[in-house]
Amino acid sequence: GIACTIFEKEEEVGGVWRKNYADFALQVPKELFEFPDFPYPENFRCEDFPTGPEVQDYIVMYSKAFGLRDKIRFKTFVTEVKPLGNQQRGWQLEFHSTEPGDRTKKSETFDFLVVATGMYGWPPHVPLARGSQKFQGQILHSCTFTDRKQAAGKKVVIVG
């Protein structure tokens, strides 16, 4: 096997499925949204178009089935990545815990680096349209829209 370290800033795997899609479901059948080596288990109760929490549960099951959790440093935020330089191969990562009161910077080196932040990296990029400063409402990035109650009783426009 390959010695591997995974940094995850949150307390659980799942990315956007962990909290952003509680009120939503897949737009495709579950068979089109599963890992090739891990079909949805027969005993896993979910709809043909799984809800956000069902997808989250599936991702957690995958992480357990393949022993990934032992490789994950949960609640760890990577703050800087840079090549070692001086004709050395590898990468230096700086990181800290996301636990309150524990912001001690730490550093480690690795031979290889894969950046897998997904399309909703933080902080989100929200381009501002001309005249947006005159807008009286709230402007949100889709990764911060986590509860449909945020839009209740409001006129909503989606751009993009």
Image (spheres, rainbow, N blue to C red):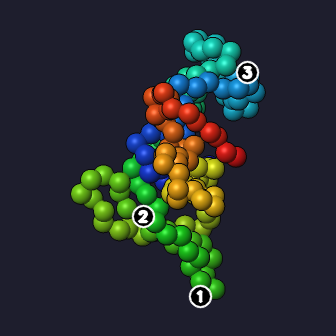
x and y percentages locating residue 7 in the rendered image: 49, 53
Q: Which quadrant of the structure image shows residue 97? A: bottom left
Nearest to N terminus: mark 2 or mark 3: 3
The reply, left or right, for residue 152 in relation to residue 105 is: right
Say if 151 sits above or below 54 in the image. Answer: below
Say if 129 sits above or below 149 in the image. Answer: below
The furthest residue to the bottom: 86
**Relative depth, front residue between 19 and 80:** 19
The reply, left or right, for residue 109 in relation to residue 37 is: left
User: Would you name the residue on which mark 3 appears?
Assistant: 29
Which of the two marks, 2 or 3, is nearer to us in this view?
3
Element class at badge 3: loop
Which of the two marks, 3 or 1, is nearer to us in this view?
3
Which amino acid, by three-letter code, is at mark 1? Answer: Asn
Q: Badge 3 local density, few (<14 within 10 Å), some, or many (20+)?
A: few
Who's the residue at 59% across and 83% down the image? Answer: 85
Nearest to N terminus: mark 3 or mark 1: 3
User: Would you name the residue on which mark 1 appears?
Assistant: 86
Element class at badge 1: loop
- Mark 3 and mark 1: span between their CA atoms? 50 Å
- Mark 2 and mark 3: span between their CA atoms? 38 Å
Nearest to N terminus: mark 1 or mark 2: 1
x and y percentages locating residue 135 in the rendered image: 53, 51
- Kindly tell me whether residue 113 is visible in this rendering: yes
Which amino acid, by three-letter code, is at mark 2? Answer: Phe
**Relative depth, front residue between 95 and 126:** 126
User: Would you name the residue on which mark 2 appears?
Assistant: 95
x and y percentages locating residue 90 in the rendered image: 60, 73
Which amino acid, by three-letter code, is at mark 3? Answer: Pro
x and y percentages locating residue 145 in the rendered image: 51, 39
- Mark 1 and mark 2: span between their CA atoms? 22 Å
Say if 82 sits above or below 52 in the image. Answer: below
